Amino acid sequence: MSDFEPGFEGILGDSPAMAELFATLRRIAPTDCTVLLTGESGTGKELVARALHRRSGRADRPFLACDCASLVPTLLESELFGHVRGSFSGAVAAKQGLFEVAHRGTLFLDEIANISLDTQSKLLRAIESRRVRRVGDTVEREIDIRLVAATNRSLPELVAAGSFREDLYYRLNVVPLVLPPLRERPGDVPLLARAFLHRLQGRPTVVAADFSPAAMAVLEAHAWPGNVRELQNLVERLAVLCGAPRIEPWHLPVELRQPTPEAGPRPAALPTRWAEFKLYKRSAAAAVVDDLERRFLAAALDRAGGNVTRAAVAVGMQRTQLHALLRKHGLGAADD
Ligand SMILES: Nc1ncnc2c1ncn2[C@@H]1O[C@H](COP(=O)(O)OP(=O)(O)OP(=O)(O)O)[C@@H](O)[C@H]1O
Ligand SMILES: [Mg+2]
């Protein structure tokens, strides 16, 4: 990390909310307290979990992350607790679970809201007894782990709705940390944008080294639904694609400069010189056409029930051409 990056373990921010978060992280990182991270997608939950581990006495032991949303209950249980050979079809060999592998380290349970009630009770038992039993096994093994859990949903609401166990919620919610969305801390945008651009300097394809004040104003005004991840991705794209040493408003995607099509770009977002305006005009027109093309394809695919071959026939295109365009626009399609 360079001097350019104020923050905590690579987590950047100088807004009051982030300063308070860093102070809490410094205090709790060396402890064994269970931490529950709540925040929208892209706000840095995993980054915080890893920072907690690095700043703890467990730093030289494993940090293991489990995406609880990506596995069906039986596989999740075997992932967490392990299994003995033959405990279910597919269990061809015995396997250690993450609880065992993370012994003396940190276990990061990501998307914790998505686990079934049944798995929740098994998880609660493991946390309370500090022991795990592999699926199909009779032996219990002692475990010493620090737990960090994360969710982008409100666990109290899920508890009220009956889909999350209240006792497990209290077990996890020892130190609750909320990562604020970027739109609630617009003051962090310049710092983050410059730091991300700074990290890319020296790469052969990167020309841009800074943002103009007008471009930065546009970034600060954006709502960032994808939070820091969205900003980081945009900076990486701009660094390569803008082709100029300074990023200007007209290099930014139209949707950032032009919140609603009726409103048009803000005057500050328009170039003041003709040569630049010509470039701006070209990129704005391309973006509009691109958007129309995406909507045309999405509607065609929708009418064909997601079937690419049928959609291609219906609109009079080659299937391969349609397929390539769908890929370009990131439109998923069912396989024929
Ligand atoms: N405050 C920050 N400073 C620097 N980088 C950040 C910050 N917050 C997030 N990032 C970066 O943004 C990206 C997304 O962060 P991360 O994966 O931790 O988010 P998340 O909250 O776990 O998102 P999701 O819920 O989608 O999994 C990562 O590349 C991370 O390094
Ligand atoms: Mg994450």
Image (tube, rainbow, N blue to C red):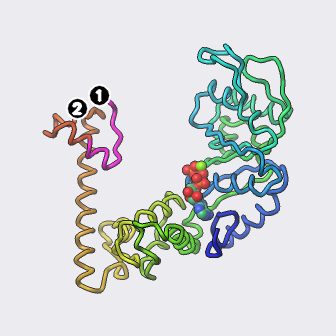
**Amino acid type of the residue tagged 2 in the rendering:** Thr
- The picture places residue 160, in percent across and down from the top left corner, at 69, 41
Quarter assignment of residue 100: top right
Asked if residue 125 lies in the magenta stretch, the reply is: no
Give coordinates of residue 234: x percent, y percent: 44, 63
Element on which disc 2 rests: helix
Can you give x and y, in whole percent of width and height, for residue 311 in the image? 22, 36
Are the residues tagged 1 and 2 within 8 Å (C-beta)? yes
Q: Which residue is mark 2?
A: 309
The residue tagged 1 is 336
Q: Is residue 329 magenta?
A: yes
Magenta segment: 324-336
Residue drawn where x is 69% and y is 53% of the image: 50
Q: Main secondary structure of the magenta part?
A: loop
**Earlier along the polypeptide chain: callout 1 or callout 2?**
2
Q: Residues within 10 Å of mark 1 (few under 14, many from 20)?
A: few
Task: Provide residue 76's location: percent of width, then percent of height.
Answer: 64, 30
